[in-house]
Amino acid sequence: MFVVCLALLPASLLMRSAAAQGKTPASIAAHVEAGEFGPARAAADDLSAEGRDQALAIIAAAQVNAGARDASFATAYDIRSDQARLGAYQQLRSSGSSGSYGGGAGSFSGGDAPGGSRGGGVIADFDALIELIVTTIDPDTWDDVGGPGSIAEFATGVYVDAGGMLKKYNGDIDRSLSDVRKSAAVVGNSRNPRRTSVLRKISLTRLEREVQLLHAQGKNPDSVMRNLAGLSRIQFVLVYPETGDIVLAGPAGDWRPDDDGRMVDEKGRPVVQLDDLVVTLRNAFSETGRFGCAIVPTKEGLAGIQAKQAEWAKKSLTSSNRAEFLEDLRSALGEQDITTHGIDPRTHAARVIVEADYRMKLVGMGLEKGTGGVTSYLDSIELAKGEAPPPTNVLRWWFTLNYDALRSAPQNDAFQLHGPGVKVLSENEMLTERGERVHTGKSSDLNSKFARSFTKNFESLAAKYPIYA
C-alpha cells in the first residue's frame, strides 16, 4: 500500500507525510523538495534499516518525477529489503510513462551496475537454507530397487526428492572450507568472466539484484547472467548470514552454443544455467520438494509386446533371427508417453531431464552405443541354441542423486559436494496379458548389471553425451 501511494503523491507531500509519521527526518524531506538528492541519500544512510529503505524509495520516486530515471533506479537498487526494492521498481516503471524501456535482450556490462560492489540484501530465512544444505544422501536407504524415497508409483526416468532421499548430515567437518569462504567474502567486478578459472564465485544475492534491476528496466538478463559466468558445476555453497549473501563457487570458463544450441564450455560440457537454478530452487523450497520425469509405455503397447512374446515363445531364437525378434518387440511397444512432475514441462530444466532419461533408455535398449564397460540390456541376453527368450518384464531404470559426501565448515556456513552426483537404479515389473504393470521390488541380474555399469561409467558417458555433464 505504501508503494501504491507513492505513485499518487508529489515528492514534497510524500516527504511531509513520512516525516509527520516519524519515518523520515525533516532534513531529508527538505533535501528532496529542493532537488538535492545526493545529500538526501547520504542522510538516509544514517537511518535504521527500515527507515533507510523507506527514505530511498521516496528519493527514487522523486528522482523519476524530476526526470532522473537512471538515478532513480540506482537509488532503488540500494534498498536492502527484497520486497521493498521490488515495490520501488514497480512504482518507478509505472511513473513517467513517457519514458521508453525498450524490451529486447538487455546488455549488461559485467560489473558496472548501480551499486557496484556493495553488499547484498537480507535473505529472510537462513535457517531453512542451511537445513536444506546440511543434508546428504544416505546410501543405506537405497538398494538396487529403491528405498524409502521411492514413494511415487512407477517412479521411473529421473527422480529427485529433496527430503525423502536425504538425511541429516552429522559429520565430515572440513576446516579448510573456512578459508575458501573467507577468500570469497569479497566478490570483485573487474575480472573477465570468460577467462578460465579453477574457482569462480557467483554471488546469488548480487545476481538477484542485477536481474531485478534489468527486469524493472524492461530488459532481459545478459549472457553472463544466464550462463552464471561459465560455471560448469557447483562445487561449493558459501553462506554469509551477517550480510545476507549466498555464493556458489566452482570451475568455470568461456562458453558457446554447440550444434544443438546447448551452451557448453571449451571442453563441450554444459554450463550451469540461471533458469535451471531458479526452477530447481523453487521446487526445493516448495511443499513437496520433488521433481522428475518418466517415459511410460502405454497399456496397448505393453499388451502388444506380450502378444509378440507369446508368438516368439513357440520359436527358437537364434543369431540369425535375433534382430527380427528385437524389431518385433520395439514395433509392438510403439510410442510412449512422456510426463514430468514438480517442475513446469516447458522449462529448460524439464527438457534436460527428459533428454537425459531418453538417452539412457536408448543406450539400455541398444539403440545408441554406450561406452566401454556399458553393455545394453538386450545385447547382454545370451541364450543357448533353441532356448526361448526370457519372459517379458517391464524394465525400470531411473536416475537419482549419488553424492558420496557433503563436507561442511565448523560453523555450517560453507559446504562442498563430493561424488559423481548421479546414479541409475533398476527394478523388474511383471506384465499381465492386458498390459498392466505389477511391482516386484526386485531387479534381475541383467537389469542390475546395466544400471551398475551405467553408474560406474557415468563420467565417460558424460564425455560422449554432453546432456549428462
Image (cartoon, rainbow, N blue to C red):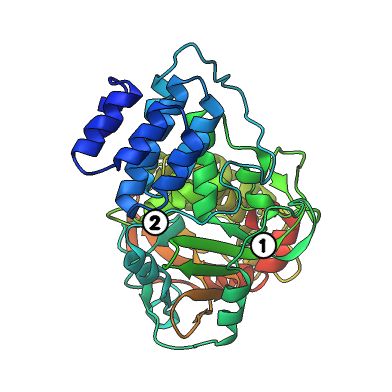
* Residue occupied by mark 1: 379
For the point 48% across and 72% down, the residue is 444
For the question of whether residue 374 can be seen, the reply is: no
- Residue 386: horizontal and vertical position, in percent? 62, 65
Q: Is residue 31 above or below residue 355?
A: above
Which kind of residue does numbered mark 1 sit on? Asp
Earlier sequence position, callout 1 versus callout 2:
2
Q: Which residue is mark 2?
A: 122
Q: Is residue 55 left or right of residue 426?
A: left
Of 345 and 174, nearer the camera is: 174
Q: Nearer the viewer, residue 321 or 11?
A: 11
Residue farthest along the top direction in this orientation: 98
- Residue 65 seen in render: yes
Q: Is residue 324 above or below residue 375?
A: above
The correct choice, above or below, for 336 with respect to 290 in the image is above
**How far apart, in angstroms, are the residues tagged by discs 1 and 2?**
56 Å
- Quadrant of the rendered structure where residue 86 is? top left
Q: In the image, 282: left or right of 181?
A: left
Q: Residue at x 30, y 43 (%)?
A: 25
* Secondary element at image label 1: helix
Labelled disc at residue 443: none
Residue 140 x/y as whole percent = 41, 83
Q: Residue at x 41, y 75 (%)?
A: 134
Relative to 299, is 449 on the left or the right?
A: right
